[in-house]
Image (spheres, grey):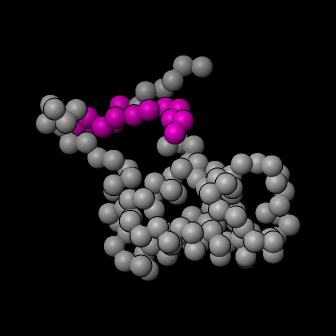
């Protein structure tokens, strides 16, 4: 597309560009962790610290989109009971499925949208 002088925008770049201050980044992270249903205060704090340790905004966004595998971070022993359910499940936070497993892809053409319904 770019070779045909078509502007290509990547969601990862747009999201990273929107993190213009520490307050916005913290607000994004708070909402992200709420949506991820991290209930235990200790687990939530350790996961938040992990994400906030990622200084590069693009890498931060990439990690939120990819989810957080349990082998990436060892949560301390003071976990909330709900954080221990399905302890063999490989993720603390699941990947964002619509970013990896798009069911109905779409494209913008001029001022319109072409929504392509997948069969099945």
Specify whether 5 is left or right of 40: left
x and y percentages locating residue 60 in the rendered image: 45, 62
Side of 100 relative to 85 (left or right): left
Residue pictured at 80% horizontal, 49% vertical: 88
Image point (35%, 31%), residue name: 114
Of all residues, the one furthest to the top in this rendering is 119
Q: Quadrant of the N terminus?
A: top left
In depth, the one of 27 and 48 nearer the eye is 48
The residue range painted magenta reads 100-114
Identify the residue at horizontal 60%, vertical 19% (top origin): 120
Question: Which of 97 and 55 lies nearest the eye of the viewer?
Answer: 55
Question: Quick one: 101 or 49, which is closer to the camera?
Answer: 49
Q: Residue 96 at x, y = what percent?
A: 56, 48
Side of 65 relative to 42 (left or right): left
Q: Evaluate whether residue 31 shows in this view.
A: no
109 versus 40 height, above or below: above
Rendering coords of residue 84 (x, y %): 83, 61
Taking the spot 71% from the left edge, 48% from the top edge, the residue there is: 90
Quadrant housing residue 13: bottom left
Residue farthest to the left, as pictured: 5
Quarter assignment of residue 71 = bottom right
Depicted 23 relative to depicted 44: above or below: below
- Residue 76 image position (x, y, % from top left): 75, 71
Q: How many marks?
A: 0
Residue 104 drawn in magenta: yes
Find out whether residue 16 is within the magenta segment: no
Residue 44 seen in the figure: yes
């Amino acid at each position: 597309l770019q070779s045909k002088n078509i502007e290509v925008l990547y969601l990862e770049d747009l999201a990273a560009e929107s993190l213009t201050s520490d307050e916005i980044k913290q607000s994004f992270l708070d909402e992200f962790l709420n949506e991820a249903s991290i209930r235990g205060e200790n687990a939530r704090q350790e996961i938040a610290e992990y994400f906030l340790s990622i200084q590069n905004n693009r890498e931060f966004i990439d990690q939120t989109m990819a989810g957080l595998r349990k082998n990436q971070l060892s949560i301390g022993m003071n976990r909330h009971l709900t954080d221990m359910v399905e302890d063999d499940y490989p993720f603390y936070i699941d990947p964002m499925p619509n970013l990896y497993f798009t069911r109905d892809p779409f494209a913008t053409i001029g001022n319109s949208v072409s929504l392509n319904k997948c069969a099945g």
